[in-house]
Amino acid sequence: MPPVQPPGSSAPAPSIELWSLREETLLEELPEGSALVLHSRWGDLRIPRPGTVLTETLRRMLLGPVQLDNVPGVDELAARLRLLQALRQLAGLVVRSVGAPDGERPLLSVVPTVTGARLDPVPVPAGRMMRLSRFAQLRSNGHDMVLESPLSQFRAVFARPEAGWLISMLSRPVTLERAAARTPLAAPVVGALVSHLVATGMVEVAEQPTAPHDAVFPEDHDPALLPWSADDLRFHWSSRPGGRDGDFGATYPLRGRQEEPPRLKRPPDGPRIKLPGPGPGIPDWDTSLTEVLERRRSVRDHGSADLTLHQLGEILHRSLRVREPAGPGAAAAPHEPQRRPYPSGGARYELECYLTVGRCAGLEPGAYYYDPLDHALIRLPDRAQLATALLDEAQAGAGMSARPALLLTLTARFARVSWKYSGLAYALTLKHVGVVQQTLYLLATGMGLAPCALGTGTTQLSAEAFGLDWREESAVGEFVLGTLPEEREVSSRD
């Protein structure tokens, strides 16, 4: 593909600097030119006595990317300087773009994602290595390619495929000159693109001129960034407000597009085993919260005695059951809030519990679903090999010397949370897992059992064992349970 340049010209094609306003911005002109008001996601901004040049410029920017040179009056130096200063004050409302002489869509648009972001394009010195940040992520938004990073206050949008060549070149250290020689863009255009990307912080420039294999970039030795993986930092950034411009909070993003998932999952078919509940009154194992907290430990070996059905029933009843009584009313109101022993954001209660039994008196080994409304176990189809694999995986994950007596797998019906919340849905689910695991720890400690939460598990394995579509419901937390070993003091650790 030849470099983008005007037809019939052999000179290097210049880039075109374009300006526009964020798409959701609205412009209100008050009577007699007394003021302009810009309405945006970040509130209203009032500009008193804007003058004809700024007013006309903002009118045009509202419609899409424009060249400032085309605005009447901008050719006067004083007027141009005043205009540039005014646009700088608008900060997070102004989108900067790089266009090409063919007049098609911009090659690059840099969109601010926080209110005070100002883009100052930075020329790259000749011969200096540059590289895409390891925290930058390229994705599709359905129409264009989008480059984002938790470390940037901007989003870079690539509307044309030519720019994709440049991004691929920046995956490793490269000079501006070499990148320009290997992309279907004229050198001045590549220079403009790179200067904008460097200004976003998503492209780094080497600290000293060196060969590619010797290039050192600021990220390489920043002590604040070394502990972070790209995935972890992006997850943290995307699940907290303030660092991005996406929808966040209880926005009900799927309302009108998808039915709200029912508050309770329809139990699977299978043999049902009614679990005993705790007796009335205070249990004989009950003690103070302070004492239970002090005694809590992760116990990674189980005793020779089996868990009893009564112990299992009591711990599930006190940790995961639906507190509302079963009956016609529960089924008649599938979307009403529910109450359980643990807190859940927005009362979504998306967590489900599956049991993989190795040893428990009164239960055959295998996989079960816990029905929290009926306080019962439902035997799942026999998949003995998968159940054994789950217990083996739990043994390895906990560092146990033998298979655990019982594995509790917490799954999430993700749409229960994402139907209501934007931005924080998955992070909220992980918090729910944490409060359930702590509840299980405290109950098991009080009851004199051996608890241990696991760090992770294999998504596909648990989905196959429980007959789930992991995209809709899959494991998000694991917990092993058994009786205390005879020598507990040598088998417990955190």
Image: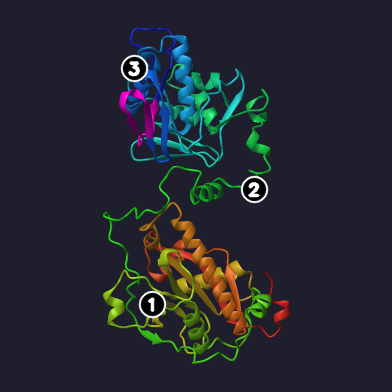
Q: Which residues are magenta?
A: 20-38
Magenta-span inclusion, residue 191: no
Q: CA distance from mark 1 to mark 3?
A: 63 Å
Assess disc 3: are there few (<14), some (14-19) or many (≥20) residues with their C-alpha within 10 Å of its C-alpha: few
According to the image, label 3 marks what residue? Answer: 102
- The front one of 113 and 91 is 91
Say which amino acid is labelled 1: Leu
Residue 358 position within the rendered picture, expressed as x and y whole percent measured from the top left? 52, 80
Q: CA distance from mark 3 to mark 2?
A: 45 Å
Say which amino acid is labelled 2: Pro
Q: Is residue 297 left or right of residue 403?
A: right
According to the image, label 2 marks what residue? Answer: 227
Q: Quadrant of the N terminus?
A: top left
- The mark closer to the camera, 1 or 2, is 2
Residue 380 numbered tag: 1
- The front one of 411 and 16 is 16
Q: CA distance from mark 1 to mark 2?
A: 42 Å
Question: SS for tag 3?
Answer: loop
Count of all numbered marks drawn on residues in the image: 3
User: Which residue is depicted at the point 36% across and 18% down?
Assistant: 52
